[in-house]
C-alpha cells in the first residue's frame, strides 16, 4: 500500500517477462501502428486533395480518420517504448494525459459515428432533402459538436478519476484505463466516477439504439430499391459502419461496466481492451473507407496509378 501523495508514477501491465517476446510485441505494435497511421493518412490526403470528395460523407470520414490517428497514437507509442526498453513505468502526468486524450478521441469517435449514421439516413431515406439538411454549415457544426463533446467527456472523467487518492500504482492494463485505475483508489469517492461511467455508457447505448433504429429505416428503404446494384451500393456504405460501431460499443461496455471486483481473467480484460481501443482505428480504413470507390479512385490519382 502506498501513501496517495507518494504516487508519482504508475506501473503498467507487463504483458511478458521474456525478452524475446517483448521484442516481438514491439514489432507487432509497430506494424499495427504504422498500418493504422498510413491507412488513415491516406484517407485524409485523398479527401483533402480531391475536390470530388468534398461531400458530407467524405468530410465525416476525414474527421474519423483524424480521430483514429489520435486515439491509437495516445496508447501504442508508449506501449512500444516500454516493450523495447523492458520497463512498465509511466509518469503520473503521463497517465493523466493518456486518460484525457484517449477518452477525448474515443468519445469524439462515437459521436462522429452517430452523425455518420444520420448522414446515411438522410441520403437514403430523404434524398430530396439531403442538400438542404446536410449543408456545409450543418456538417461543420455536427463535427464541431462531436469534437467538443469528446473534449468535455475526457476532461470530466479525467478530473473525477484523478481527484481520488490512490493506494497503489500497479495498473493491470497496458495503458492507463479508468476501470483499472478505479481499482487502485483507496476511498469511497471512486463510486462517483463509477456512476459517471455508467451514465456515459448509458448515453453511448442510447447512440447505439439510435443507430439501430436509423439502420432499420435505411434497410427498409433499401430493400424496396428495384435494382440489385442500387441495393449493393447502399449496403456497402452502411454495413461496415454498423459493424465498426457495434464492435466498439459492445467491447467498450464490457471493459467499463464489468464490476471492478470481477474475477474475470486479466487475459480476457486485455483482449476486450485491445478490441475496442486498437481494432477500430486499424480496421476503419480497410472495412469502411477503402471499400469506397470514390476514395479508391482518388488514391489512384494521388499515386498516378492510372
Image (cartoon, rainbow, N blue to C red):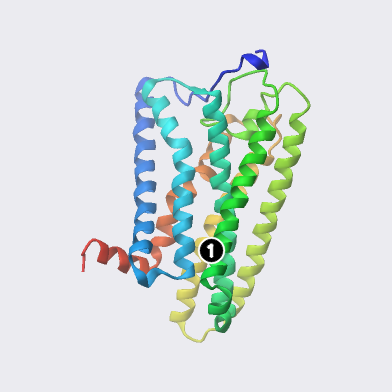
Secondary structure, mark 1, is: helix
Residue 13, image x, y percentages: 52, 25
Residue 252 vertical placement versus 179 (above, below): below
Q: Is residue 249 visible in this depiction of the protein?
A: no
**Residue 47 percent across, percent down from the top left:** 38, 63
Q: Residues within 10 Å of mark 1 (few under 14, many from 20)?
A: some
Name the residue at the right extreme: 188
Q: How many marks?
A: 1
Instruction: Out of 117 and 232, give the one closest to the viewer.
Output: 117
Residue marked by disc 1: 140
Reply above or below: 303 against 93: below
State the image coordinates of residue 37 (x, y, percent, origin top left).
Answer: 37, 47
Near-viewer residue (8 or 171): 8
Residue 7 horizontal side relative to residue 188, left or right: left
- The structure residue drawn at horizontal position 51% and vertical position 70%, both measured from the top left corner, is 136
Residue 248: tell me if it is visible.
yes
Residue, far bottom: 226
Residue drawn at 71 percent across, 29 percent down: 261
Q: Quadrant of the N terminus?
A: top right
Q: Give me the residue at 59% from left, 68% from top.
A: 118
The quadrant the C terminus occupies is bottom left
* Residue drawn at the location 48% of the way across and 36% of the way down: 75
**Is 143 in front, or is 267?**
143
Question: Can you tell which quarter of the image residue 161 is in?
Answer: top right
Q: Residue 189: x and y, percent?
A: 77, 28
Q: Is residue 202 left or right of residue 80?
A: right
Amino acid at each position: 500500500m502506498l501513501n496517495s501523495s507518494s504516487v508519482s508514477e504508475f506501473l503498467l501491465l507487463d504483458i511478458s517477462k521474456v525478452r524475446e517476446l517483448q521484442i516481438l510485441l514491439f514489432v507487432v505494435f509497430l506494424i499495427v501502428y504504422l498500418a493504422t497511421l498510413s491507412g488513415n493518412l491516406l484517407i485524409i490526403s485523398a479527401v483533402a486533395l480531391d475536390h470530388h470528395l468534398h461531400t458530407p460523407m467524405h468530410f465525416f470520414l476525414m474527421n474519423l480518420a483524424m480521430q483514429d490517428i489520435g486515439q491509437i497514437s495516445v496508447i501504442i507509442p508508449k506501449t512500444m517504448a516500454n516493450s523495447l526498453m523492458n520497463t512498465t513505468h509511466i509518469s503520473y502526468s503521463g497517465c493523466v494525459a493518456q486518460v484525457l486524450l484517449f477518452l477525448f478521441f474515443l468519445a469524439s469517435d462515437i459521436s462522429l459515428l452517430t452523425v455518420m449514421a444520420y448522414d446515411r439516413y438522410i441520403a437514403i431515406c430523404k434524398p430530396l432533402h439531403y442538400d438542404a439538411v446536410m449543408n456545409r454549415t450543418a456538417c461543420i457544426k455536427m463535427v464541431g459538436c462531436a469534437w467538443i463533446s469528446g473534449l468535455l467527456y475526457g476532461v470530466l472523467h479525467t478530473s473525477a478519476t484523478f481527484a481520488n487518492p490512490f493506494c497503489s500504482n500497479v495498473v493491470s492494463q497496458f495503458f492507463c484505463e479508468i476501470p483499472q485505475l478505479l481499482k487502485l483508489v483507496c476511498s469511497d469517492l471512486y463510486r462517483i466516477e463509477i456512476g459517471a461511467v455508467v451514465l456515459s455508457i448509458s448515453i453511448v447505448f442510447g447512440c447505439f439504439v439510435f443507430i439501430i433504429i436509423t439502420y432499420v429505416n435505411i434497410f427498409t428503404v433499401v430493400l424496396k430499391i428495384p435494382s440489385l446494384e442500387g441495393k449493393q451500393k447502399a449496403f456497402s456504405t452502411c454495413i461496415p459502419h454498423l459493424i465498426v460501431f457495434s464492435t466498439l460499443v459492445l467491447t467498450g461496455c464490457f471493459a467499463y461496466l464489468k464490476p471492478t471486483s470481477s474475477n474475470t481473467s486479466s487475459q480476457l480484460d486485455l483482449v476486450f481492451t485491445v478490441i475496442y481501443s486498437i481494432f477500430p482505428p486499424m480496421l476503419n480504413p480497410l472495412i469502411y473507407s477503402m471499400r469506397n470507390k470514390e476514395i479508391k479512385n482518388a488514391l489512384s490519382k494521388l499515386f498516378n496509378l492510372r
